[in-house]
Amino acid sequence: MAFLEIKNLVKSYGETPVLRNVSLDVDQHEVVCLIGASGSGKSTLLRCINSLEEIDDGEIWLGDNLVSGEGTDVDQLRRDVGIVFQSFNLFPHMTVQENITLAPRKVRGIASSDAKDRAAQLLERVGLADKASSYPDQLSGGQQQRVAIVRALAMDPRVLLLDEITSALDPELVAEVLDIVRGLAHDGLTMLLATHEMSFAREVASTVCFLDAGTILEQGAPGQLFGDPQKERTKAFLHRVTEAGRL
């Protein structure tokens, strides 16, 4: 059994199908990049895994535990599966340290001093040790996104979901955020990324999945999918990306 297993996932908004029988196996320590045009289902898939969206059919397994459907312990799921959004979603009235330590203290019951020590270690790692007492509006977009990643890491998740985390950033700030993700991949954290950063996906992914109209149309190792795609739709998408200078 895969570490994270998605079986025949179906999700619709009203009469509009968004995910159509999506199945995906993710091994521990694997980095899976989800690529595809806007509206292809990438973000919805991530939100379903984290139970931010209810699925209409199918199953999601984390290890030996079914983590979808009726009776799911959503609180436990979100301890195990962290998610970072493109819009940061930091609490504006809290300092960086308070943003990072809130969930470990309230959800995991970690002592305040231990939570602060962990926050300090993580902030040091991402080059923001001097920003613990700052508020989000005193930070650049790239700094806010790094704090959002640290906030997710502070819960020691088994899986980290990253939803277009660079799309709201100015181009010069993208690299500093991707450097953090690159380091997490090197450390062996299991991750699923929805991204438009094709060169980064080619570099960091174990597996790349091309989503089209709510299905995983093609998946494979980065060298294979980017270098020798088999589906005409994949070829057309990558051709447009290359023309736009994104690959």
Image: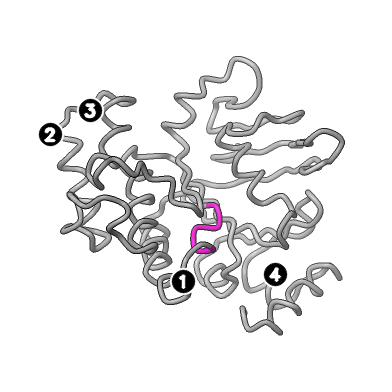
Q: Amino acid at mark 3?
A: Ile
Cβ atoms under marks 3 and 4 closer than 8 Å: no
Q: Which residue is mark 1?
A: 170
Frontmost of labels 1 and 3 is: 1
Q: Which residue is mark 3?
A: 110
- Quadrant that contains the C terminus: bottom right
Q: Position of residue 24 (x, y in %)?
A: 68, 45
Frontmost of labels 4 and 2 is: 2
Q: Indicate the secondary structure of the residue bearing disc 1.
A: loop
**Dominant secondary structure (helix, strand or loop) of the stretch shown in magenta:** loop
Q: Amino acid at mark 4?
A: Leu
Q: Which residues are magenta?
A: 163-167
Q: Indicate the secondary structure of the residue bearing disc 4.
A: helix
Mark 4 neighbour class, 10 Å CA radius: few under 14, some 14 to 19, many 20 or more: many
Quadrant of res 127? bottom left
Measure the C-alpha gap from mark 4 to mark 2. 47 Å
| Mark closest to the chain's N terminus, 1 or 3 | 3
Q: Which residue is mark 4?
A: 225
Q: Amino acid at mark 2?
A: Ser
Measure the C-alpha gap from mark 1 to mark 4. 28 Å
In the image, taking residue 179 as reference, residue 159 lies left or right, namely right
